[in-house]
Image: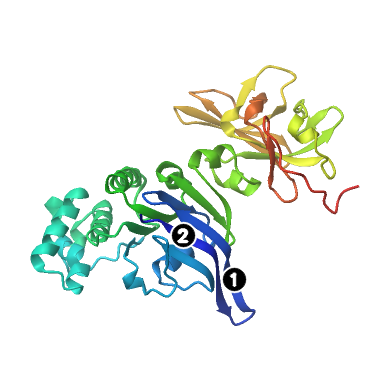
Amino acid sequence: MSDVELRAVVKTFPDPGAGETTVLHGIDIRAGSGQFVVLLGPSGCGKSTSLRIVAGLESATSGDVLIEGVRVNEVPAAKRHIAMVFQNYALYPHLTVLENIVFGLRVRKVPKAEREAKARDAAERVGLEAYLKRRPSQLSGGQRQRTALARALVSDAKVVLMDEPLSNLDARLRHQMRVELRELQRSLGLTVLYVTHDQVEAMTMADHVVVMRDGNVAQAASPVDLYTDPADAGVAAFIGSPPMNLLPGRLDEAGLRLAGDGAGLPIPTAVATHGLADGRLTVGVRPESLALTDDAAAPLAGTVRLSEILGAETLLTVDLAPGEQVVARLPGIVRVADGAHVRLAVAHDDVRYFDHTSGRRLAGADDDPAPLERTGNAR
């Protein structure tokens, strides 16, 4: 068992102007044994601080850190038996690949024959056998990253912490390294806690994604569940490229009215059975859930602001009303002139509804909503 857990962890830092600043607000995070868990969020959300607390490089102000079920708050970083891989690789430029890989073992006075055997085994796993005599300056970015990973592997740690390890690589190499990292993690049965701001890395590599925002966990779920059932409008807007379209809507006797001169949507049963404060809500629709139509009763209509033909797909940015637009993802090559008036059909089963004030999810088209609370704007 090599699971990692943060329980109700709070972290504060001294702030000369305000006494102290809280950067983690009682968060709960768990990576089960052999899981690849990604901490995802924008800069300043607390994801790297969380990783440093697991590593023992920062202490939690309150709450518990558990590794393999044992509380390790007071255990020094060197004795937590975990490995770390950082964004900048932290390789010694004057040492060869082999010497970099075995450096930690040499410090721990592991016999030379044993440490070199471990290093060669790790190098073979990450495809570096032919580069052991080279120095970091003679390696590509991907090879330097694999050297840092091999150094982590020789420690025999079953828990590996990774802080933005691919951010310095170009797009093609990032894709290659995503595949290699995932294959290595699975083949070695490693428990990985991985920090990134890149949702593509999170969606393609993770078993479980923890979306963080302002020192809190906004949602923790599988990549598919995050995409299809975001917990709030913030997660909906963060996951997906292009992200989910979020439109203001208002319920009246005729249905759900949206921006522009479209016909709107029928009132969703799951929402209509609960009283909204003032009939307002936010409607979320993924770009691929929109399609061009000639139907005059289409829920959305507007003017094409920009058409982007990407080959396998075409992205249409459509202005519905001043300040309101949607992006539609259409399969294949679709030729629509900028400035053309278009109508858009909506896949009703894919629509999600959010409270317009708090942003929390109310319901999808076919599920039960969260209980709705009336706000101070209620009449």
Q: Which residue is mark 2?
A: 5
- Above or below residue 192? Residue 281 is above
Do we see residue 110 in this rendering? Answer: yes
In the rendering, at what x and y percent does residue 184 appear? 28, 47
In the rendering, at what x and y percent does residue 330 appear? 54, 26
- The image quarter in which residue 227 lies: top right
Task: Say what amino acid the circle numbered 1 marks.
Answer: Thr
- Above or below residue 102? Residue 270 is above
Q: Secondary structure at mark 2?
A: strand
- The image quarter in which residue 363 lies: top right
User: Gap in Å between the C-alphas at discs 1 and 2?
Assistant: 20 Å
Could you classify mark 2 by the number of other residues whose Cα lies within 10 Å: few (under 14), some (14-19), or many (20 or more)? Answer: many
Asked whether the beta carbons under mark 1 and mark 2 sit within 8 Å of each other, the answer is no
- The image quarter in which residue 266 lies: top right
In the rendering, at what x and y percent does residue 253 appear? 87, 29
- Between 129 and 307, the residue placed more toward the observer is 129
Q: Residue furthest right?
A: 379
Could you classify mark 1 by the number of other residues whose Cα lies within 10 Å: few (under 14), some (14-19), or many (20 or more)? Answer: some
Q: Which residue is mark 1?
A: 22
What residue is at 30 percent from the left and 62 percent from the top? 89
What residue is at 81 percent from the left and 28 percent from the top? 255
What residue is at 58 percent from the left and 64 percent from the top? 26
Q: Secondary structure at mark 1?
A: strand
Q: Which mark is residue 45?
A: none
